[in-house]
């Protein structure tokens, strides 16, 4: 049986430059999988490969058996991949609620329980009193909640989170990750891309360490030997 999201022999080139050299990654429903790696290791390229947004990708990426490689980015969202992009990308001319509702225009219902504004505000009650002000007026942590909410409104089966902890205080990161753990316990498959190795291991079920465009180490996060992971991370 293959995993819900199964990535096999993924190569990704930017013109002549090869950024990914044959990557194998699996994510199942209800799992949090961390992809860790230093600057330039290939984390964002992996996300771009899955979302079909940039680069020339080869190999196979299947979601519940359906090949995603070759689909357009909107069709990939429609198929069930939700993206929380690096840097959040909140639209300043739109209110918090309008930013969140944008996601609903892209997705399609998978399963019985569609995401609604009501469910979003239950998950992120901090957003309720701010729903009508510009999304960029909120704190960094709250803007990250908007970005997660917008991705959830596409009703994803797999949520990709690109460096959501960047620039946030540890307590805020802890709160965001608590929400991701809750979402995984409800059956969502979550891939978190992080530079912060220790934090990523703490909150994930399994991890893949990337180095120069390949997987240098992988395994169960609670069995990870920090020295070995650090060697795989830095290539020493
Ligand atoms: P960071 O944490 O700095 O974002 P990363 O692990 O996400 O790093 P990538 O952004 O995937 O790494 O970059 C992997 C390699 O691909 C790097 O050598 C980078 O310079 C190169 N690269 C990334 N984007 C492009 C692009 N659009 N065109 C050419 N090369 C690129």
Image (spheres, helix red, strand yellow):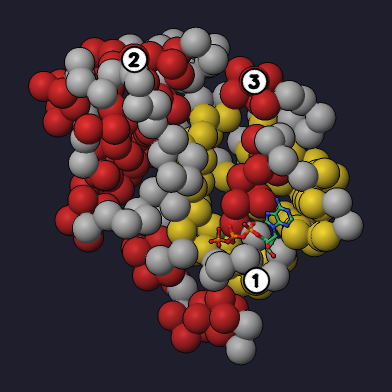
**Residue at 50% in and 53% down:** 193
Nearer to us of marks 1 and 2 is: 2
Q: Helix, strand or loop at disc 1? A: strand
Sequence-earlier tag: 3 or 1 = 3
Q: Helix, strand or loop at disc 2? A: helix
Can residue 185 be seen here? no
Q: Nearer the viewer, residue 16 or 227?
A: 16
User: Which percent across, then down, holds residue 117?
Assistant: 28, 13
Q: Is residue 77 above or below residue 171?
A: above
Q: Label 2 to label 3, Cα distance in Å? A: 19 Å
Q: Quadrant of the N terminus?
A: top right
Sequence-earlier tag: 1 or 2 = 2
Q: Helix, strand or loop at disc 3? A: helix
Q: Which residue is mark 2?
A: 98
**Residue at 35% in and 27% down:** 92
Q: Which residue is mark 1?
A: 211
Q: Which residue is mark 3?
A: 74
User: Which percent across, then down, holds residue 220?
Assistant: 49, 64
């Amino acid at each position: 049986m293959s995993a819900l999201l199964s990535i096999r022999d993924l190569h990704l080139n930017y013109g002549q430059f090869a950024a990914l050299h044959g990557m194998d990654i699996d994510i199942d429903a209800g799992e949090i999988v961390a992809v860790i790696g230093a600057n330039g290791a290939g984390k964002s390229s992996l996300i771009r490969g899955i979302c079909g947004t940039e680069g020339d990708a080869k190999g196979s990426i299947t979601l519940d058996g359906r090949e995603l490689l070759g689909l357009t980015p909107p069709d990939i969202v429609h198929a069930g991949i939700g993206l929380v992009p690096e840097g959040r990308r909140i639209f300043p001319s739109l209110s918090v609620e309008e930013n969140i509702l944008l996601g609903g225009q892209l997705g399609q219902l998978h399963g019985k329980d569609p995401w609604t504004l009501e469910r979003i505000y239950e998950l992120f009650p901090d957003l309720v009193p701010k729903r009508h002000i510009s999304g960029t007026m909120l704190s960094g942590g709250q803007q990250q909640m908007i970005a997660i909410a917008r991705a959830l409104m596409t009703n994803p089966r797999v949520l990709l989170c690109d460096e959501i902890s960047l620039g946030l205080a540890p307590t805020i990161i802890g709160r965001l990750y608590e929400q991701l753990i809750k979402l995984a316990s409800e059956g969502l498959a979550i891939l978190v891309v992080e530079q912060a190795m220790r934090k990523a291991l703490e909150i994930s079920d399994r991890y893949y360490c990337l180095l120069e465009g390949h997987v240098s180490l992988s395994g169960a996060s609670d069995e990870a030997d920090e020295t070995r992971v650090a060697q795989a991370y830095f290539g020493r």
